[in-house]
Amino acid sequence: DSGVTQTPKHLITATGQRVTLRCSPRSGDLSVYWYQQSLDQGLQFLIQYYNGEERAKGNILERFSAQQFPDLHSELNLSSLELGDSALYFCASSIDFLAGRTDTQYFGPGTRLTVL
Amino acid sequence: AQSVAQPEDQVNVAEGNPLTVKCTYSVSGNPYLFWYVQYPNRGLQFLLKYITGDNLVKGSYGFEAEFNKSQTSFHLKKPSALVSDSALYFCAVRDNYGQNFVFGPGTRLSVLP
């Protein structure tokens, strides 16, 4: 158990809908990362938040957004869902001490999103 | 932009034999390199990382990796494979600027009894 929690474990929804995925980092970790894992695209970095602020952006679509709250939990919002958004979405956290480049990321168990 | 290649989709090895999972990278400046393992229906678990110093890094579950700057490689190794090592292995790199974290496509390791 990494100490990172994600809810829900599974989510089934329809095209065009909007969903919110939630992540609670390990105690003491200030950074949260979001990843998408699909069969054809592999593991893709989406976005990173550090202590409430956006720090780095990867291959995140404009239909997707995220935020990190004062209690450090994070939410990933996916809107206007398409069939191709079906994937595993992982959250990871790290301490991000100093520059944070070397920090180990600890991954949650993931949320499996199915768009029908 | 940085990139990571794992040239083998699948590696098969007999239990008790040594295993190697290959990784090469491209990055600006000094690389920060990581290996993660993913078991079925689970999240990724950290195995080891190279930041600086000794080129041979030892990690969890008896795994080690060798950083080779001239060949831009960071191959994962284990002297004696176990059936329970069967999983999906990811190499990842972060660059000097820490702005992105890139994973390789993954290598599926099967250890045969």
Image (spheres, rainbow, N blue to C red):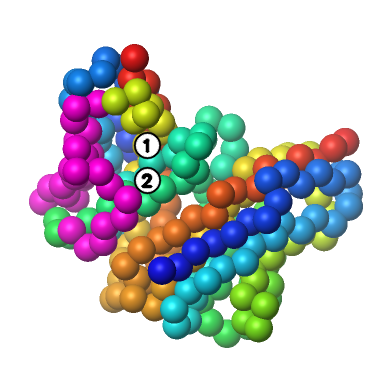
Q: Which mark is residue A89?
A: 1
Q: Is residue B22 visible?
A: yes
Q: Hey, what amino acid is under mark 1?
A: Tyr
Distance from disc 1 to disc 2, alpha carbons, whole Å, reads 6 Å
Q: Which mark is residue A35?
A: 2
For the point 26% across and 61% down, the residue is A56
A49 sits to left or right of A41: left
Residues in magenta, as a range: A54-81
- Percent position of residue A102, x then y: 42, 71
For the point 80% across and 55% down, the residue is B19
Compare marks 1 and 2 and give the one earlier in the sequence.
2
- Percent position of residue B110, x then y: 76, 40
In the rendered image, the vertical position of residue A83 relative to residue B73, given as above or below: above
For the point 85% across and 57% down, the residue is B18
In the rendered image, the vertical position of residue A5 relative to residue B100, given as above or below: above
The answer to whether residue A71 is magenta is yes
Q: Secondary structure at mark 2?
A: strand
